[in-house]
Image (tube, rainbow, N blue to C red):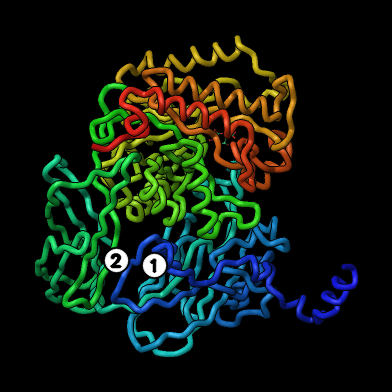
Amino acid sequence: MKKLLLLLCCGIPAASFAQSPEIPASLLPASKMAWDDGQDAMRNRLFRTTTCRTQIDLGGWWDFVADPADAGEKRGFASQFPPPETTLWVPGTWNAVARYWSYVGPGWYRRRFEIPADGNAQLHFGSVFYLAKVWLDGRPLGEHEGGYIPFNYTLTGLKKGAHTLVVRVDNRLGDRTLPKKNVDWFPYGGIEQPVYAEMVAPVFVERFHVIPSAVSDSKAALKVRVFVRNLGPEVEEKFALSVDGKELHAGRQRIGPGVSVVEFETALDRPRIWSPASPNLYSARVSLGADRDDQFTRFGIRTVRTEGTRILLNGGRLRLMGANRHEDHPDWGSASPPHLIRQDIEIIKRLGSNAVRAHYALPELFMDYCDQYGLVFLAEAPAWQYSPEQLGAAEIQEKILSHLQEMVARDMNHPSVLTWSLGNEWPNPDRSYDAIRSMVERARKFDSTRLITFVTGGPNAWRVHELIDVICVNWARYQWYDPFTTLDRAEGDESVSDLARIHARYPNKPVILTEMGGAESQAGWHNWGNVKWSEEFQARNVEDSARHALEEDWISGGCVWQYCDTRSAPERFLGGRMRGWNGKGVVDAWRSPKLAFYRLQQVYRAAQENAPGGKAAAVGGGK
Ligand code: ADA
């Protein structure tokens, strides 16, 4: 054996180490996945998004150089890229690679690619964290601030042949960024989601939204909103919409230069309703002219409203049995490959969940799986724990709103999206009453079909709660941070009665425990005495909080904090965090179950079995 190892080592020329990729190729998914899953690997979606456009996958190995002195712009890296330090896989993050594990600062990426014919193209970035500046052939295309969500550039008059794309990425956060510095997750830097170019016609569909309304057993009205870009002078275009292959609308419209919104209405007979118990989906296609351009999406038909303390999905009560998820994995950072995203969904389903919440937009592939597996999704802008001074700044309010608007633009069609939250745990939110009221009012205009909210921390009833459709509270039956805490009945009872104050002040509003039960545990460490950081301590806290959320009639359930252990911000290395990780996962960072997973599974299963109307009704049964 030793001999063999020696031979293997000697067989690798020393020089190849210097240039070898940081991640062994054997660990990487193929750049294009098979279609066996119905999966579109280039875009990381579960369905094909176009049949008309030629697509160029810009994933794979990119040249990379870190720029800790932040000298790259001055030194002209955009047109004269320095000798690369290495190559990095896109989509990916440099913080999952040993050499840049802790690196926070600017980094430069370069990739060459071929355009098959002269024409126009749409260049798409799924998400870059945090600040992206992009150049094509040395020419600046623009800048985009904020991770998690996509952005595009339209390239006109492109010539057939080789081109060079350079992206400067900077993952430094500060007091005025969204999220701010020192949030409780790692600011993974890089091009985290797929990048591709698509050859487009002079008039093309940027995206379209299908918005169901007036849903009954016999009919659902559909409002369709198409965002079209015209690169030339005004023209007349034919628009057609088909759903599951059947044409429902065709019409002509004059389209001026730039971006226009074309709206029309149609209807579906005897709609198949989407619900967690029966996640029925429709496929929709908008085409222009005689197949000059097209786009596909999927959508679902369901209704959401509140009545007193209840959230009604398709008219039936919805109680959440969910989990909070960060996009995080020790080997992949914030860029999990498709098979791991799917595995997370399957583990979350196995937990007995019908809901997921996240502090920011999760990958589109994850959203496709939520639609398909019947999980409702609590969406949130990454406005985490801003102080009243920060929230009072017009610049921050604008960032939150434009980020939320981009989230809505991306995720409007997902039936899984239940709520839009403006942010999380703003201390003393009543001090920011006016700012919050104006943000809530503006957010309602982005999408009037979802519940609008923000999340508060702890069992306090605030005046700002009067502004929102559903009160979202982060709460645990036993507190998390006292270093000497052991679970104690009296403390738990006090915490429960504190929570009831919210209902006493707002007896006609639904309450969701958006983070419940969280307690840190070191996977594998057991202790008889319910001592903090033991699996027993966490399991009991999770179990008690979830049981309470599902037993109290005025609470609409909740989401455990959190699904898996995650890497925290570099500033949080010591103190409340074990080795800089947030260890409150019910599975560990590699997704091995902890005791809390099984306890929570029992609570969720019992709630489903004992529910009036049976399991389907408990998880959110459709008609
Ligand atoms: C808060 C916060 C989470 C996480 C959690 C914790 O509830 O919303 O992001 O930081 O505390 O683990 O302390």
Ligand 1 quarter of the rendering: top right
Residue placed under numbered mark 2 in the picture: 206
- At which x and y percent is residue 514? 46, 32
Residue at point 32% right, 46% down? Answer: 279
Q: Quadrant of the N terminus?
A: bottom right
How packed is label 1: few (under 14 Cα within 10 Å), some, or many (20 or more)? some
CA distance separating discs 2 and 1: 9 Å
Image quadrant in which the C terminus is located: top left
Identify which amino acid the numbered label 2 is placed on.
Glu
Left-right relation of 161 to 184: left
* Mark 1 vs ligand 1: CB below 8 Å: no
User: What amino acid is at disc 1?
Assistant: Asn
Give the camera-side residue of 366 and 139.
366
Residue 152's disc number: 1
Which residue shows up at 64% across the image and 71% down it?
Answer: 25
Vertically, is 473 above or below 217? above
- Which tag, 2 or 1, sits closer to the chain's start? 1
